[in-house]
Amino acid sequence: MKFFVLYLKGHRRAIVFFFLFFFIFLCSFLLYRLPIGAVIYPAFVCTLIGILFLAFDFYKAVKKHQQMLALQKLSCALMESFPEIQTQEDSDYQQIIVQLREEQLQLENAMNLQYMDMVDYYTIWAHQIKTPIASMRLTLQNEDSELSRKLSDDLFRIEQYVDMVLVFLRLDSDSSDYVIGQQDLDDVIKQAVRKFSGQFIRRKIRLVYEPVTIRVVTDEKWLLFVIEQILSNALKYTPSGGTVTINREEPKTLCIRDTGIGIAPEDLPRIFEKGYTGYNGRSDKKASGIGLYLCKRICNNLGHLITANSSLDSGTVIRINLEQKKLEIE
């Protein structure tokens, strides 16, 4: 109905002129004292022909409108079958669309090249920075002092940030290095625990690890990154003397629970958003809001479900549902 009203508005000039000419002829016949039927009968015939023509034109307009609606559902690159050109206005509009598509394609190509250059640069940088980091770690291993331990902790965080850069760059890469297969979940967890063992000791945080004894379909490297990020957050926000617990909930849900400061209720729905730091992040002044965002993205890519439950001063529990329904073993 709305389209019909708009159609009539678009043809209102022709309709107004038709009735104007009818009125002029009627007045002329009356002034010359001619029979009024002589103008009403032709006017009736012309009206009937006009309605038939209007109906046919409306049918063509509906088909054209349906074509345009179908085009709206396509991306710009796939817009090819435009309605047949019937007026110069149609030709002008289609020419404008073609020019805009060409400009958009050129802009996308330029942006893609710029993005690839940036990715290549930061990938090289991330790999090169690992060399001086490894050198500094070897140097610090030969010393055992309060200063060397503090520097080791800082160096450990730098390594984490470098890994986050590499993961961030690879997430949207056209070539993925996912290798999906059956993995022993305990082996993956133990790798992460060994990496953070020094942090647990220095911060005097107790680890309660209950072997999960399951195998899951996943990518070992990417899942390891997710577990490391969760452990890093647990250590960051758990005070000295606290506890971090790793166990399993049936059937295949990995739980990492801490007794830290927790997450405010208003922040909990948004902790997996990119760049969102929340109350804890604003207090810490160093949080980037990227770690959990990367965890969410990776879990989505692997077909896992990651969720969080928490409250202030009551700790946080992160659950990763590792049941696999979509991915097949390679």
Image: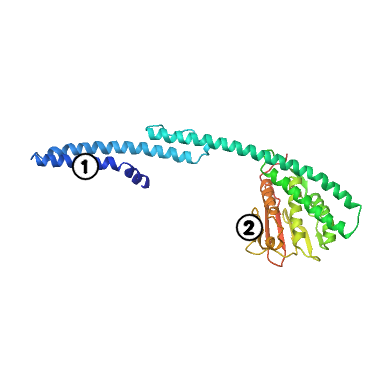
Q: Quadrant of residue 250?
A: bottom right
Q: Is residue 99 left or right of residue 110?
A: left
Q: Amino acid at mark 1?
A: Leu
Question: Label 1 belongs to which residue?
Answer: 20
- The label number, if any, that marks residue 115 in the structure image: none
Q: Amino acid at mark 2?
A: Arg
How many numbered marks does the figure carry? 2
Q: Hey, which residue is sitting farthest left in the picture? A: 33
Q: Which residue is pictured at 13% across the width and 40% down the height?
A: 28
> Could you tell me if the residues under marks 1 and 2 are in contact, i.e. CB atoms within 8 Å?
no
Front-lying residue, 157 or 77:
157
- Label 1 environment density (alpha carbons within 10 Å; few <14, some 14–19, many ≥20): few
- Label 2 environment density (alpha carbons within 10 Å; few <14, some 14–19, many ≥20): some
Q: Is residue 325 left or right of residue 203?
A: left
Observer able to see residue 200: yes
C-alpha separation, residue under disc 1 versus residue under disc 2: 64 Å
Q: Earlier in the sequence, mark 1 or mark 2?
A: 1
Q: Position of residue 66 (x, y in %)?
A: 42, 39
Q: Is residue 159 left or right of residue 264?
A: right
Q: Position of residue 274 (x, y in %)?
A: 65, 53
Q: Position of residue 139 (x, y in %)?
A: 89, 50
Element under label 2?
helix
Q: Position of residue 78 (x, y in %)?
A: 52, 35
On screen, 218 above or below 269?
above
On screen, 91 above or below 170?
above
Q: Which residue is pictured at 63% across the width and 57% down the height?
A: 270
Question: Label 2 belongs to which residue?
Answer: 270
Observer able to see residue 248: no
Q: Quadrant of residue 243?
A: bottom right
Colour mapping used in the image: rainbow
Q: Hey, which residue is sitting farthest bottom in the picture? A: 313
